[in-house]
């Protein structure tokens, strides 16, 4: 009875409402079954090559056959436990940064700080581990390394750039403006090429940065410049009274920003910050133009294989699915943060 | 400058661009004195008291607060700000912190007080302004009067040697003005040195040792309340009084 009432109230409350509901139901009824057929019921999951896919639906066998490459690229099989370890530790490295109420957060934060170094050591190799150059990395590994790495390293840089752009000290102010405007003024792909080809020319002889590190540098400064402008917008929205109250209490510049201004400015910029983060995460696909094989690059490599040729839809749907899972996660997290930080009268907070 | 002086203005001038807001202000306030500053809007009264904790910079003359001269020296500014509490027209509580955290923040970060001690101190002042049962709420969940009382408690938590009030009741609904004024009267009775910019003449009569009347960037008159209301010297004071009483 309850659900009947709900249907009546929400779907058929007025004539217009009823018509819209009926049209939509008809539309869904005619679209969903064929999609389900293609995705699941008529799909082939196991086959040796594309001729093995005899059914009407999707040929997911290509994903299965290439799964290793999608996850690890061409990382040597006997060393792949290192990547798996990096993946397995990722939630523990990130969780304490995202939630402030997890048990043992303090201890976990130390792990979070050590995590980037662990990642480097494990992926690259070092004392006791054979070295694996980044041209062997690929797929999700590259996407996460550049995407998450860029976002996380760029965040503190953005804050300093945004503060610097509002600084009263002319040297810092000019430096920040020039940096932000230069980086924002060129496309990411230019920065990637710049990092890949020109960066080595500026570095002292003997220092040879790996391609993926050059890409990480490019992606990071790009995100830092964009993030800085978003945060600056938030800083500008702060009422003057907040600065004055903090100063009148005797707080120093850094205390004022750390305890009063930034917590509020970052809160109102969460949606825009997450927006640029999602943008960057997807833009990491551009690295295939400097020879790194991220998820998309691996997908294109799979399509070039004569055994699996012309399975574009399957491969791109799979890649899109992986990107979607991460980006959707970002946006849900930003909603959670907004709700948590809401201290207005209408907030659920306490 | 006498022995008891806690604020000393000597010939202080200030300009906003071409406009001169303060024109050679001379004023001396003794420890424990309560001064009410009044005058028409744009007369420079807010600017004057904001110079005392350097929220505004004066360009000419000399300001000495509690023995420290205000110059570009950041250390001096910090020293003065630690000893001078301020209450604003718009309360300016920190909306992302609970009332209690608003109050303990500066003692913990500026005075380096242990958290337990700062909390005890804050509770003591919050009790005094009678919002001890609201301490875990956020500012926007409180009424204007409650917010302003919390703001007073926040300033008191730094245990300042003098308190500045910049039109503390002007943004409040009429029925809330009294609760804030009562807190301020209590503070005055306890001997706090206070400079209050306000139009509340009832408060001025009851509490002020001197009333300072400003117009066009100058101090026109500074007198004890009885004298000020009954026997003003200048025409401008008479005109102002006739308009607000």
Image: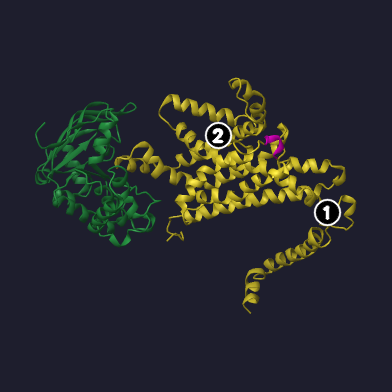
> Is B164 within the magenta?
no
Q: In this orientation, which residue lies closer to the viewer: A301 or A33? A: A301
- Side of A328 where B71 appears, left or right: left
Residue furthest front as drawn: A128
Q: Is residue A286 above or below residue A268?
A: above
Circle nearer the viewer, 2 or 1: 1
So how many labels did they put on this image? 2
Picture residue at 55% right of the left edge, 34% below the top:
A225
- Residue B217 quadrant: top left
Which of the two discs, 2 and 1, labels the residue nearer the N terminus?
Answer: 1
Q: Chain of mark 2?
A: A
Q: Position of residue A68 (x, y in %)?
A: 74, 47
Chain identifier matching the green colour in the rendered picture: B
Q: Quadrant of the N terminus of chain A?
A: bottom right
Which stretch appears magenta?
Answer: A132-137
Instruction: Please give the residue where the numbered disc 2 appears in the rendered image.
Output: A225
Q: Residues within 10 Å of mark 1 (few under 14, many from 20)?
A: many
Q: Work out which quarter of the rendered image holds the C terminus of chain A and state it.
A: bottom left
Displayed quadrant of residue A262: top left
Query: At numbered mark 2, what does the secondary structure look like: helix, strand or loop?
Result: helix
Identify residue for label 1. A59
Residue occupying the point 76% across, 47% down: A316
Q: Chain of mark 1?
A: A
The image shows residue A273 at horizontal and vertical percentages of 55, 44
Q: Nearer the viewer, residue B225 or A280?
A: A280
Tell me the element at label 1.
loop
For chain A, give the colour.
yellow
* Circle number at residue A89: none
Query: Callout 2: 10 Å neighbours few (<14), some, many (20+)?
Result: many
């Amino acid at each position: 009875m309850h659900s009947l009432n709900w249907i009546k109230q929400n779907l058929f409350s007025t004539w217009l409402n009823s018509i819209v509901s009926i049209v939509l139901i008809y539309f869904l009824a005619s679209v969903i079954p064929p999609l389900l057929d293609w995705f699941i019921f008529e799909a082939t999951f196991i086959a040796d090559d594309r001729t093995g896919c005899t059914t009407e639906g999707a040929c997911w066998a290509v994903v299965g056959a290439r799964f290793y490459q999608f996850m690890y690229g061409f990382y040597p099989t006997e060393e792949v436990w290192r990547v798996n370890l990096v993946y397995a530790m990722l939630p523990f490295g990130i969780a304490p940064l995202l939630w402030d109420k997890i048990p043992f957060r303090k201890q976990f934060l130390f792990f979070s700080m050590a995590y980037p170094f662990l990642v480097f050591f494990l992926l690259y190799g070092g004392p006791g581990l054979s070295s694996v150059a980044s041209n062997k990395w690929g797929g999700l590994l590259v996407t996460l390394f550049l995407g998450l790495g860029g976002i996380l390293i760029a965040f503190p840089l953005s804050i300093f750039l945004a503060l610097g752009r509002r600084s009263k000290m002319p040297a810092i102010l000019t430096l920040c403006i020039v940096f932000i405007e230069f980086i924002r003024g060129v496309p990411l792909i230019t920065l990637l090429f710049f990092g890949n080809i020109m960066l080595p020319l500026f570095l002292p002889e003997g220092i040879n940065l790996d391609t993926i590190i050059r890409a990480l540098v490019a992606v990071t400064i790009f995100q830092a410049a964009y993030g800085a402008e978003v945060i600056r917008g938030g800083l500008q929205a702060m009422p003057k009274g907040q600065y004055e109250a903090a100063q009148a209490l005797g707080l120093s510049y850094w205390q004022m920003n750390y305890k009063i201004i930034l917590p509020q400015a970052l809160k109102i910029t969460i949606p825009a910050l997450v927006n640029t983060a999602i943008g960057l995460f997807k833009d990491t696909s551009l690295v295939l133009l400097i020879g790194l094989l991220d998820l998309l690059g691996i997908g294109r490599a799979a399509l070039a294989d004569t055994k699996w040729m012309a399975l574009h839809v399957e491969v791109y749907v799979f890649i899109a699915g992986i990107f979607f899972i991460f980006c959707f996660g970002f946006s849900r997290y930003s909603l959670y943060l907004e709700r948590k930080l809401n201290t207005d009268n209408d907030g659920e907070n306490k | 400058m006498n022995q008891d002086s806690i604020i000393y203005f000597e010939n202080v001038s200030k300009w906003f661009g071409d406009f001169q807001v303060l024109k050679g202000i001379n004023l001396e306030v003794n420890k424990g004195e309560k001064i009410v500053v009044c005058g028409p809007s744009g007369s420079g009264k807010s600017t004057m008291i904001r110079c005392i904790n350097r929220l505004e910079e004066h360009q000419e003359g000399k300001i000495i607060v509690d023995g420290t001269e205000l110059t570009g020296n950041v250390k001096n500014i910090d020293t003065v700000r630690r000893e001078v509490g301020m209450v604003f027209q718009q309360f300016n509580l920190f909306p992302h912190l609970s009332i209690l955290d608003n109050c303990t923040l500066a003692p913990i970060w500026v005075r380096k007080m242990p958290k337990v001690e700062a909390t005890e101190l804050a509770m003591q002042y919050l009790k005094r302004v009678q919002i001890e049962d609201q301490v875990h709420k956020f500012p926007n969940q409180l009424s204007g009067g409650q917010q302003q009382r919390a703001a007073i408690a926040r300033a008191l938590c730094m245990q300042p040697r003098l308190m500045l009030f910049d039109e503390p009741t002007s943004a409040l609904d009429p029925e809330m003005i009294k609760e804030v004024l009562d807190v301020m009267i209590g503070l005055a009775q306890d001997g706090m040195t206070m400079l209050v910019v306000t139009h509340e003449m009832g408060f001025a009569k009851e509490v002020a040792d001197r009333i300072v009347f400003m117009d066009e960037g100058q101090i026109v008159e500074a007198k004890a309340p009885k004298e000020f209301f009954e026997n003003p010297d200048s025409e401008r004071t008479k005109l102002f009084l006739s308009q607000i009483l």
